[in-house]
Amino acid sequence: MDSTARRTALVSGASIAGPVIAYWLGRHGWDVTLVEKAPAIRDGGYPVDIRGPALDVVRRMGLIERLEALHVDTRQSTFLDADGRPVAVIDTGDLVGGVRGRDLEIPRGELAAALHSAVPDGVELIFDDSIETLHDHDGGVDVTFRGGTRRTFDIVVGADGVHSRTRRLAFGPEERYHRHLGWSFAGFSSSNELGLAHESLIWNTPGRMAALYAPGDGDRVFAILGFSSPSPAVHRDPDAQRAVVAEAFAGLGWRTPGLVEAMRAAGDLFYDSVGQIHMPRWSGGRVALVGDAAYAPSFLSGQGTGIALIGAYVLANELAARPSHTEAFEAYESGLRTFVERNQAIADVSRPVLNPATEEELALRDRALRDPSSIPSGNAVRGANDSYVLPDYPAPAL
Ligand SMILES: Cc1cc2nc3c(=O)[nH]c(=O)nc-3n(C[C@H](O)[C@H](O)[C@H](O)COP(=O)(O)OP(=O)(O)OC[C@H]3O[C@@H](n4cnc5c(N)ncnc54)[C@H](O)[C@@H]3O)c2cc1C
């Protein structure tokens, strides 16, 4: 490989996977452009988990101490029955597979900011813009940006999330790759009326879940209202979204009437169906996808951030280490597909724990909660993380 030829990459999406690609390719001497449709790095959001081999990615980026200082440490999860009575109080690590003292739980916006802080100076950052069209040919990928600019890059990486535009432009409509997991949810912040601290409450009746999540001891909590839905209940209009959720929780108990009211008033409502992305190939021609764009596992796996970090690290380092993008894309996929699929499979194990669909599933779940070592979601996460060792690559030149 001619190490003096500067190869060019356009990375779409600057949240988790995007800055990791930019960091490694930039340090390996590539000319990297990172385009983000939001006007700035997206702040806020719920905490996400970094576990097992994903910790090695942030360690190799020199970020581990900064991230350890941001760790929020959710300690316990209390499951409630239909009337709000406790069914079980368990260590959150047993539920989500985290290892106390090692794994990290970081507010998403703060993780994104930390990853950006590491991106080398030479990386070009473009906010408030996105890819409008892509034309992939032997000599490169011609890109038109929404703002009107036209440029050509050696490769394009889509790190633009579960509803990726890069994926749609290069590989076709989302419906082709989306797997609906049988429920939809609304997420929003709410006042911490119960004074929760470092804990979560999870209330269920068959097919319904209401959760309150207090990563710290502040006066706001993250609330989720989830409900079984046979098909993806995707409504773009926030009023329609609120109406669907309110109808799903009409007449139900515990604090759900108050939560529905809080959802109606929330300025930060996030609504989606719970789904995954499954693609037969994560790349084609000169375009590759990474993170949620290629293999979103859904929040049920708790591993979306981890596999986005790992995928970005492996893809960038394979690109830097190999003479052609074709070989690099193949190595990225063959090295990671089994691990990624194992992480996606966690969602099928977690769904009956978090949102049992029937009385039978709920009774089975409640029995499992009595013996924390048998909670299937925690065991599945630990098994997946133990199954993969982050590869070593040559040190970057810069
Ligand atoms: C409610 C919820 C809870 C979750 N909880 C957890 C958890 O506990 N643990 C965990 O590991 N994961 C969790 N996740 C998943 C996690 O947030 C994602 O898996 C992770 O952020 C994926 O990173 P990404 O960089 O691939 O994509 P994203 O973080 O989705 O980032 C995509 C970026 O692309 C940008 N973008 C979108 N379209 C365009 C465009 N056309 N042009 C340019 N930019 C664009 C977006 O603005 C965004 O900045 C959760 C997700 C949800 C929704």
Image (tube, rainbow, N blue to C red):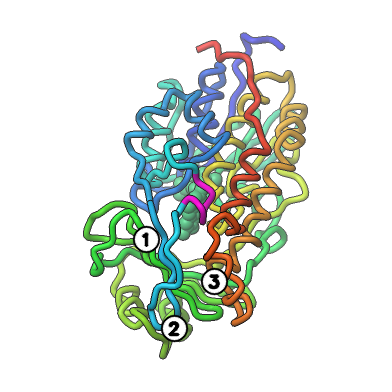
Q: Which residue is mark 3?
A: 366
Residue at image location 58% in from the left, 49% down from the top: 292
Residue 267 among magenta residues: no
Q: Marks 3/1: CA distance?
A: 20 Å
Q: Which mark is residue 249?
A: 2
Q: Marks 3/2: CA distance?
A: 21 Å
Q: What amino acid is at disc 3? A: Asp
* Residue 160 seen in render: no
Q: What amino acid is at disc 2? A: Phe
Q: Marks 1/2: CA distance?
A: 19 Å
Magenta residues? Answer: 93-98
Q: Is the distance from the Cβ of mark 2 to the nearest ligand 1 atom less than 8 Å?
A: no
Q: Quadrant of residue 52?
A: top right
* Residue 275 seen in render: yes
Count neighbours of disc 3 (C-alpha within 10 A) and say few if under 14, some if 14 to 19, many if 20 or more: some
Count neighbours of disc 1 (C-alpha within 10 A) and say few if under 14, some if 14 to 19, many if 20 or more: many
Q: Does label 3 or label 1 sit earlier along the sequence?
A: 1
Count neighbours of disc 2 (C-alpha within 10 A) and say few if under 14, some if 14 to 19, many if 20 or more: some
Element carrying mark 1: strand
Q: Which residue is mark 1?
A: 213
| Nearer to us in this view, 274 or 157 | 274
| Nearer to us in this view, 255 or 25 | 255
Element carrying mark 2: loop
Residue at image location 68% in from the left, 38% down from the top: 387
In the displayed structure, does residue 66 sit left or right of residue 79?
left
| Nearer to us in this view, 48 or 135 | 48
